[in-house]
Amino acid sequence: MFGRAPKKSDNTKYYEVLGVPKNAAQDDLKKVLQEKKVLEVHVEKGMQHNQKITFPGEADEAPDTVTGDIVFVVQQKEHPKFKRKGDDLFYEHTISLTEALCGFQLVLTHLDNRQLLIKSNPGEIVKPDSFKAISDEGMPMYQRPFMKGKLYIHFTVEFPDSLAPDQCKALEAVLPPKPASKLTDMELDECEETTMHDVNMEEEMRRKAHAAAQEAYDEDDEMPGGGAQRVQCAQQ
């Protein structure tokens, strides 16, 4: 007796699952198989926000198509103290009026944890909203890591809310004299005296904008027909 011949294996369904024709070459089959690959991304010193790091030809492969690239986009995190603009760094610092007039000393912890000693020159006065620059303490330049931008320090001067009369007299004794009035006492007596008060300008502008919008609404509401267009159908 003759035994049955073994059936040949039908791999058609595997080709259908992979989405390739039956006569696909070995290289085409490799393109549709999943493969894990580790890519090492090196962020170089001085790279900018949204700068791209490209790995050519490392995207998913598919038969009869050109393999694309894998692109990583560098996202720069915000820092609570430093702000970056290109190769430069900006640092906000508040000092007292005494420090602004008589000198200050600041120990600044840099991004690389170095301690920088920053102090004003003898007799130097720091004015409100002024900037000071320190060369070569900014960000390293891209592909030129030994060159750095500048570190700018923006100073805010904190003034006292009030001074006692004796403190005012002490200041007047050491500060330049106040400018003399160009008006005579008689002319000053004829002037109307006013009183100043503190104001929050952002809140003031919001209040004015709201009042203007309300006024425009009220004027529109007082127009004939209540500000709305009323259309009547013509009688046939």
Image (tube, rainbow, N blue to C red):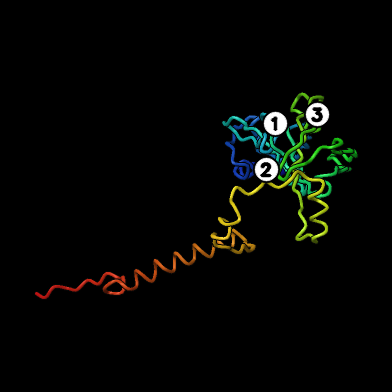
Q: Amino acid at mark 3?
A: Asp
Q: Nearer the viewer, mark 3 or mark 1?
A: 3
- The residue pinned by badge 2 equals 7
Q: Which residue is mark 1?
A: 55
Task: Say above or below: 20 vs 136.
Answer: below
Q: Quadrant of the C terminus?
A: bottom left
Question: Answer yes or no: do the residues labelled 3 and 2 have beta carbons within 8 Å?
Answer: no
Up the image or down, 163 lies above or below 129; here it is below
Please name the amino acid that badge 1 sits on: Phe
Camera sees residue 158: yes
In this rendering, is residue 228 above or below 102?
A: below
For label 1, the crowd category at 10 Å Cα-Cα, with few meaning under 14, some 14 to 19 and many 20 or more, is some
Q: Is residue 208 above or below residue 22?
A: below
Amino acid type of disc 2? Lys
Q: Number of numbered discs present?
A: 3
Looking at the rendered structure, the secondary structure element under dot 2 is: loop
